[in-house]
Amino acid sequence: MSILTISVLVLLSIVLIVILTSVTKLNAFASLFMVSLLLAVIALPGKDIVEILKQGFGNTVSSIGFLIIFGAIIAVVLEKTGGAASIANYILSKTGHRNAASAMGITG
């Protein structure tokens, strides 16, 4: 494929992602997944698609997998010990009840 063809496909993919997420209100993850799969079907040989997807997912999980696992463990510990509620109450006391949505956003 030429550089021009690849550039046009990437540009069209970005436009399609923006349309799917903003106009149709489709979930961003679903939009990204669908468009990347469509781009793979268009640009790659059929036999290579599954192997490339496995490779990409494996590389991503190997680099951030432990962060996700440890983050989930910390979240469960905070919830079970009441730490999450304490953090939320503290931030709510500082921001006030009028800004409860902001307090929840800060708390996570």
Image (cartoon, rainbow, N blue to C red):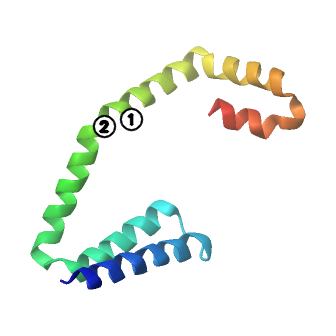
Residue carrying label 1? 68
Q: Count neighbours of disc 2 (C-alpha within 10 A) and say few if under 14, some if 14 to 19, many if 20 or more.
A: few
The quadrant in which residue 103 appears is top right
Disc 2 vs disc 1: Cβ atoms closer than 8 Å?
A: yes
Which amino acid, mark 1? Ile
For label 1, the SS is helix
Q: Residue at x 87, y 28 (%)?
A: 96
Q: Residue at x 25, y 52 (%)?
A: 57
Q: Which label number is shown at residue 85?
A: none
For label 2, the SS is helix
Percent position of residue 95, x then y: 82, 28
The quadrant in which the C terminus is found is top right
The quadrant in which residue 97 appears is top right
Q: Residue at x 84, y 36 (%)?
A: 99
Q: Is residue 91 above or below residue 1?
A: above
Residue carrying label 2? 65
32 with respect to 99 (left or right): left
84 with respect to 52 (left or right): right
Q: Is residue 106 above or below residue 41?
A: above
Percent position of residue 32, x then y: 42, 66
Q: Count neighbours of disc 1 (C-alpha within 10 A) and say few if under 14, some if 14 to 19, many if 20 or more.
A: few
How many labels were placed on the picture?
2
The quadrant in which the N terminus is found is bottom left
Of residues 53 and 75, the one nearer the viewer is 53
Percent position of residue 36, x then y: 34, 70
